[in-house]
Amino acid sequence: MQTLTVALDARSYPIHIGAGLIARAELIAERLPQKKVAVVTNSTVAPLYLAPLRRALVAAGVAVVPITLPDGEAHKNWETLNVILDALLEHRCERNTALIALGGGVIGDLAGFAAAVYQRGVPYIQVPTTLLAQVDSAVGGKTAINHPLGKNMVGAFHQPLAVITDTDTLATLPDRELSAGLAEVIKYGLIRDPQFFAWLEANIGRLVRREPESLAYAIERSCANKAEIVALDERESGPRALLNYGHTFGHAIEAGVGFGTWLHGEAVAAGMVLAARLSLRLGLIADADLARITALISAAGLPRHAPALGRERYLELMGHDKKVQGGRIRFILLRRIGEALVSDGVPEEALVAVLGAAGTHA
């Protein structure tokens, strides 16, 4: 087991990464303020991992309230949030009753947001079971639900007590979900870690084939990058914004095609290519950089081409993005592979040209 730390002074917490960690209930029990938890999961993950987690917790003297939700991004909304809150109230969960998010990014965001608002805030622990959640959404304390006009538009910053990443859960992950997680892995190399990007280029085949040592290394390196950024800028007033590389376009894709039609990582992958094309058009990166980026995304089994929503629809959806300031869309661009920047001064003609090519395989 490898352990990293998200350094936030008194609210610092560990990220444990290793095989078989769901059975190690002490990693959870030692962080609990009360020997009672509510485990929030979904109908896909519950048959696989709810029983072993529950057995381990009960053996450690922890009472468990299971809450099983429907699966999918389409359910990341107020109605599903209320299902969690109803269950917490019905089972008389108190302010010291921790929630455990057992699942992917949707479950982590839903359970985390429920923990942020229930009784004005209760503790929670992330037990991510998808690659995307393990390398990104489970770390950093961002919680949210979607609104019909935009992704993650209603939420809160609420840090977990711990992140327990059991790499064995990746064995049951569908290929499409694994590829979606690789999009966020690639992102870290693009925005701040050029050596990691080069490693990914050399080892992407091993990751796609799920070689355990390669996956463990990619997860650890990704989490180390994110932990450093979150420690510097917890609430995204500075460098944490760089983690949104590809997301302004990606969130527009998700909303435009309908939440759940494209996986988050798929939309981010296509968004990263659009952001790279915009960077190229602005003279920040070279053609060779764009070629490396698109080649790696393709090798990961991810889409290189965004859907043809139309430039007006893209602009409308991006206008609802959380990064809009003073009515101006803030883009994360690449200065080179391994270095990103935030810009709110993108010329309209450059953006329109890139959006106009979306869906044309240009």
Image (tube, grey):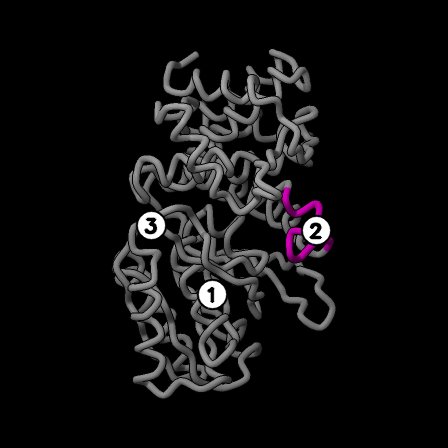
Q: Residue at x 55, y 67 (%)?
A: 160
Image position of 17 with respect to 268: above or below: below
Distance in Å between CA atoms under marks 3 and 2: 28 Å
Q: Secondary structure at mark 3?
A: helix
Q: Position of residue 255 (x, y in %)?
A: 36, 40
* Contact between labelled residues 1 and 2, with CB atoms less than 8 Å apart: no
Q: Residue at x 47, y 81 (%)?
A: 119
> Is 233 included in the stretch rendered in magenta?
yes
Q: Secondary structure at mark 2?
A: helix
Please give the residue where the numbered disc 2 appears in the rendered image.
228
> Is 147 included in the stretch rendered in magenta?
no
Q: Position of residue 313 (x, y in %)?
A: 38, 30
Image position of 338 with respect to 218: above or below: above
For residue 11, side relative to residue 113 (left or right): right
Disc 1 residue type (three-letter) = Gly
Judged by its main secondary structure, the magenta piece is loop
Q: Position of residue 187 (x, y in %)?
A: 57, 36
Please give the residue where the numbered disc 1 appears in the rendered image.
112
Q: Nearer the viewer, mark 2 or mark 1?
A: 1
Between 146 and 289, the one nearer to me in the picture: 146
Disc 2 residue type (three-letter) = Glu
Please give the residue where the numbered disc 3 appears in the rendered image.
73
Mark 2 neighbour density, 10 Å: few (under 14) some (14–19) many (20 or more): some
Of callouts 3 and 1, the N-terminal one: 3
Figure quadrant of the N terminus: bottom right
Image position of 346 with respect to 78: above or below: above
Image position of 59 with respect to 152: above or below: below
Q: Quadrant of residue 3?
A: bottom right
Q: Nearer the viewer, mark 3 or mark 2?
A: 3
